[in-house]
Amino acid sequence: MYLHYFNSKSSNFGDALNPWFWKDIVGINFDGDNDEIFIGIGTLLNDQNRFLRPSEKRVHVFGTGAGYGNSVPKVGKNWIVHGVRGPLTANAIGVEKSLVLSDPVIYLNRVINLHTDKKYKCSFMPHYQTMSKELQSVVESAGINYISPSLSTEEVIGEVNNSEKIICEAMHGAILAEALRVPWIPIATSEDILSFKWRDFCMSLDLNYNPMSFPRLWGVDTTNFVRKVVKIVKHKAFSKRLIELEKSSSFVLSSDKKLDEMNDKFEDAIFSFKERFQNLK
């Protein structure tokens, strides 16, 4: 069985979670044989995924989300859908809402010891495509801890676990915050943010998706006086917005009951998968 996930050129926590989560935490055996495919964490159900094209290969879908690409395929004859990220994905690929498991990462709630003594009052986690030293400097100037998505899995988990609350541009920062019971709030720095995947995840835990709008900090040529002034103004506006947001009451967290409900469904699905396809209990 082959584990398929998005492997970006720059390390990205959400995608890089896959091998560690499915092998070490869940205990699924992968031998690399791509005659049978396992698709897990990520927004991977789209027409660009070569493993979802008509084939004789059996494809397991486990907590995956739909989105990106040009279109979303309906369930193929060779698919076995054990669960999907949220109700929007279920509708998009044509399966029952009962298969909604939420994002598999919330299961870390049952395997990670939650910290009660926090190191950071507030942290910020950017999307891996917008992370930069420039952004880190602006965030830290606001007195907020910066969590890079390029850190190791264990480091990101530790940083979120040590935070009282978190501001997230990265969706898996929010998902991890849910697992670790850390209140969070989403931000959007561009209209290109795929709101579908955010709403899909939020709906799985009975939450609304209401992102706060922030300016994107593009690198500019500081040898040009006008552009240098624009950069300074944008930095100050971003920092001020962060400080205001940290003090707001807009942070969210799903109910413990709903989280437990989804994690119970995930455990049942994992047990069934191992029993049927790996002869493990």
Image (spheres, rainbow, N blue to C red):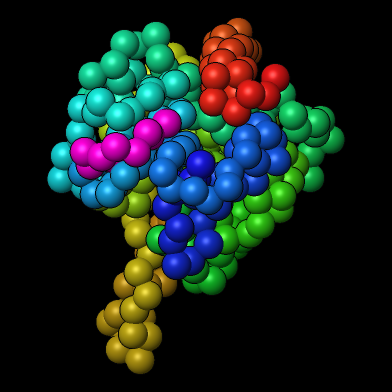
- State the residue in front, 215 or 281: 281
Q: Residue furthest left?
A: 70
Magenta segment:
52-60
**The quadrant where residue 180 appears:** top right
- State the residue in front, 25 or 275: 275
**The quadrant where residue 80 appears:** top left
Say if the magenta span includes residue 53.
yes
**Vertical arrangement, residue 123 with respect to residue 80, above or below:** below
State whether residue 87 appears in this view. Answer: yes
Residue 41 image position (x, y, % from top left) = 48, 38
- Look at 30% across and 20% down and name the residue there: 90
Q: Residue furthest right?
A: 117
Left or right: residue 75 compared with residue 169:
left
Left or right: residue 258 compared with residue 189:
right
Residue 24 image position (x, y, % from top left) = 70, 41
- Look at 41% across and 17% down and name the residue there: 100
Left or right: residue 118 compared with residue 219:
right
- State the residue in front, 235 or 78: 78
**Vertical arrangement, residue 102 with respect to residue 29, above or below:** above
Which image quadrant: the C terminus?
A: top right
State whether residue 163 appears in this view. Answer: no
**Vertical arrangement, residue 43 with respect to residue 80, above or below:** below
Residue 273 image position (x, y, % from top left) = 54, 22
Residue 195 image position (x, y, % from top left) = 30, 36
- State the residue in front, 2 or 254: 2
**The quadrant where residue 271 appears:** top right
Say if the magenta span includes residue 102.
no
- Look at 57% across and 67% down and name the residue there: 137
**Total marks drawn?**
0
